[in-house]
Amino acid sequence: MKISKKIGIVLITMVLMISVSMSLFAAAEADGGTPYIAVVSKGEQHDFWQQVKKGANAAADEYGVDITFEGPASESDVQDQVEMLNNAMAKKPVAIALAALNTDSVLDQLAELKNKEIPVIGFDSGVPNAPAGVIYANASTNNANAAGLAAEKMFAVIKGDIENATAANPVTIVAMNQDAAGESLLSRGKGFRDTMVDLIVDETALTAADIKVMGNTGFIDSKNPTSGDKVFIYMVVPASASATDSAAASTAVLNKVEEENILGIFCSNEGTVKGLLAATNDGADFATKYKDVVVVGFDAGAAQKAAVRSEYFLGSITQDPFSIGYLAVELAYKAYMGEAVADVDTGAKFYDKDNMDDADIEGLIYD
């Protein structure tokens, strides 16, 4: 009789275990049985972000996860991004990939994700100054180095004019920056600025005392030379990230080309490039009215590629947006699986009319 009771207990236990297992399986099946990763971007409006999205989707297919990819209409729409992050968190993701427009605006969400031990992967500009332990890794371009490459390419062309600069006949170099808030654009503007200053000091007879960094205060550090009167490095930020304001800021700069002897213009992202192209008849004015101005862009897109191919621009810096999206999802999945993850530099290259069709470049310059 005792044996019968034990058998009965075992059978009941087995039935309960099977029932629980079936319930869990049914729940997983109802949820699709697939891990969900939320990808919250800084935008979707530029071709760059569409390539990031393609990379993210490719990784989702590779690792068998579901993803959502969304970003606000403009990189000025911080609150819209916050709501997108809130909505994504409500769907109970196993991990999140985030390119924050403003870290301070998502501190509460980051704290909640940390408490729930949900991994967060930064991508593109990542989540600068996030609380310790929240961000597991970043998939991004070293933006300062990438913009430094732009400065090197521009300097090689305008070096002679810089060497001839005097207090009576100064020269100006312009850096167009979409805003002074996001880490990626801040790093690019500062990377261009610092590299240009170093090149002038190291490779010409001029000194830091001859240089003045001026313009938007978000791009001026205490270490920058700010009293020189021979070379002006002008940091420009439009009134907003809108196409209209970007074009207006470009027009204001172009109106001073002769008066301020502007040698070169660096555009730190696709948005500022589009603004400059809108103000110059798709760049054609650089072959006539502004033929002595050297322009270096950033990112790609059909219009920018056409400007480079037509030699309106000296060239542009390209990231690898597909890899940024792919690696963001890959890192998120690996972190969810408990694997150790680390930051990944997704790289950058300079392209011009001579190399833009090369195999190692053409895949990185999207339309």
Image (cartoon, grey):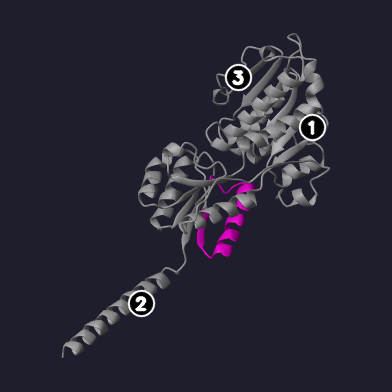
Name the side, left or right, on which 43 lies relative to 106. Answer: right
- The location of residue 248, given as percent across then percent down, is 64, 30
Q: Is residue 235 magenta?
A: no
Cα–Cα span, label 3 and label 1 = 30 Å
Q: Single out the residue that lies furthest toward the left.
A: 1
Please give the count of numbered marks on the rendered protein: 3
Which mark is nearer the camera, 3 or 1? Answer: 3
**Region in magenta:** 42-69
Rendered residue at 82%/38% (across/down): 311
Cα–Cα span, label 2 and label 3 = 66 Å
Rendered residue at 67%/37% (across/down): 146
Q: To which residue does mark 1 refer?
A: 286
Determine if residue 339 is in view.
yes
Q: Is residue 55 magenta?
A: yes
Label 2 Cα neighbours within 10 Å, binned few <14 / some 14-19 / many ≥20: few
User: Earlier along the polypeptide chain: callout 1 or callout 2?
Assistant: 2
- The location of residue 3, given as percent across then percent down, is 20, 88
Front-most of residues 164 and 342 = 342
Which mark is nearer the camera, 1 or 2? Answer: 2
Q: To which residue does mark 2 refer?
A: 22
Name the side, left or right, on which 81 lies relative to 7. Answer: right
Give the SS element for disc 1.
helix
Q: To which residue does mark 3 refer?
A: 224
Give the SS element for disc 2.
helix
Q: Is residue 94 above or below residue 137?
A: below
Residue type indicated by callout 3: Asn
